Image (tube, coloured by chain):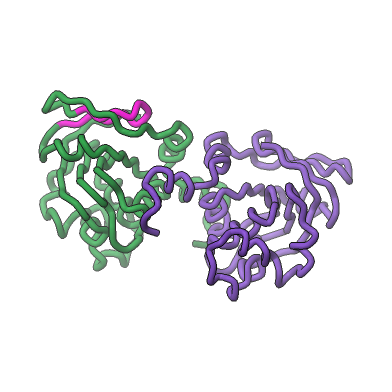
Chain colours: A green, B purple
Amino acid sequence: MIFEGTVHKYGRDVDTDVIIPARYLNTNDPDELASHAMEDIDAEFVTRVQPGDIIVATENFGCGSSREHAPVAIRYSGVSCVVASSFARIFYRNAINTGLPIVVCPAAAADAEMGDRLKVDLAAGTVENLTQGKTYEAEAFPPFMQELIDRGGLLEFVKSRVGGQGE
Amino acid sequence: MIFEGTVHKYGRDVDTDVIIPARYLNTNDPDELASHAMEDIDAEFVTRVQPGDIIVATENFGCGSSREHAPVAIRYSGVSCVVASSFARIFYRNAINTGLPIVVCPAAAADAEMGDRLKVDLAAGTVENLTQGKTYEAEAFPPFMQELIDRGGLLEFVKSRVGGQGE
């Protein structure tokens, strides 16, 4: 999987409550969630984001309360992947559950600026900042995990196996 | 992955509270949990189970409250996989989270009896009852999911990526 898009840059400790504010958790509709993505940290995000764009943040992205709505809101906003210096573990897990690609790359995350063009190769484990002309090594996603992400994450896989009933 | 072992057979609606009773949820130690696996449905299970053995049950295995302790208790008891007519969705998901192989195969589950020898080929999607001389078709696990299971499940993968901190 290779993604290329414009950077939306944030700092450290972006928590799940700014990714998708709790007041919108009364729905499971992905498009409805997406329409409020990042609203409390960047009110313009949803009007600015283009399909394929990339969220970049520094340390501890996705900290705070566990909610699968958070990676869902990001993914359905059109964002192709999130690059960060580090992720909260529960967000990392929820991203895999819901099929949102995530990349740990501290150097790329530190250097990238709002509006830069970024190219991410998940299999090769590279992040290229096309605007700044720099390439960074990230940890590659193993193929099995790429395939899980590609199939829409663990929840979709389980649904396809076990059927629609239950939580 | 190919598993061969002796069948421990149960019926329908085996819920997570008999797989690992709530009174033991005060620990996260896998071996401690395993020492109480299936205790409330089969007090002899933990003394009888041998490495590689296979739990077989009919419909809706793992229903009830969501707890990752349940597949952990089963896996650390030495059980190689669980074959059932159907699984509760949340158990199926928790099994993948924690690296317990699970196989949906209603015909094999219905026919198998306590003490039968079973051979399960996860990649081929076959369940063979060596005692009864019958072979059944199950749904094969795709290779990416086998690899995830083989690595200890999603939790271990995330831990290896994000580190030990956090939930």
Q: Residue at x 11, y 40 (%)?
A: A114
Horizontal and vertical percent for residue B51? 74, 49
The answer to whether B49 appears left or right of B104 in the picture is right
Q: Residue at x 62, y 64 (%)?
A: B32
Quarter where residue B132 is shown? top right
The answer to whether A53 appears left or right of B45 in the picture is left
Q: Residue at x 13, y 44 (%)?
A: A48
Identify the magenta region.
A117-128
Q: Residue at x 26, y 37 (%)?
A: A105
Q: Main secondary structure of the magenta part?
A: strand
As drawn, B165 above or below B3? below
Quarter where residue B133 is shown? top right
Judged from this view, the residue extending furthest toward the bottom is B23
Judged from this view, the residue extending furthest toward the top is A133
Horizontal and vertical percent for residue A59? 23, 49
Is B129 a magenta residue?
A: no
Horizontal and vertical percent for residue A18? 21, 59
**Which of the two residues, B60 or A105, is positioned nearer the viewer here?**
A105
**Which of the two residues, B92 or A32, is positioned nearer the viewer here?**
B92
The answer to whether B4 appears left or right of A98 in the picture is right
Horizontal and vertical percent for residue A123? 37, 28
Q: Quadrant of the N terminus of chain A?
A: top left
Tally of numbered discs: 0
Is A126 a magenta residue?
A: yes
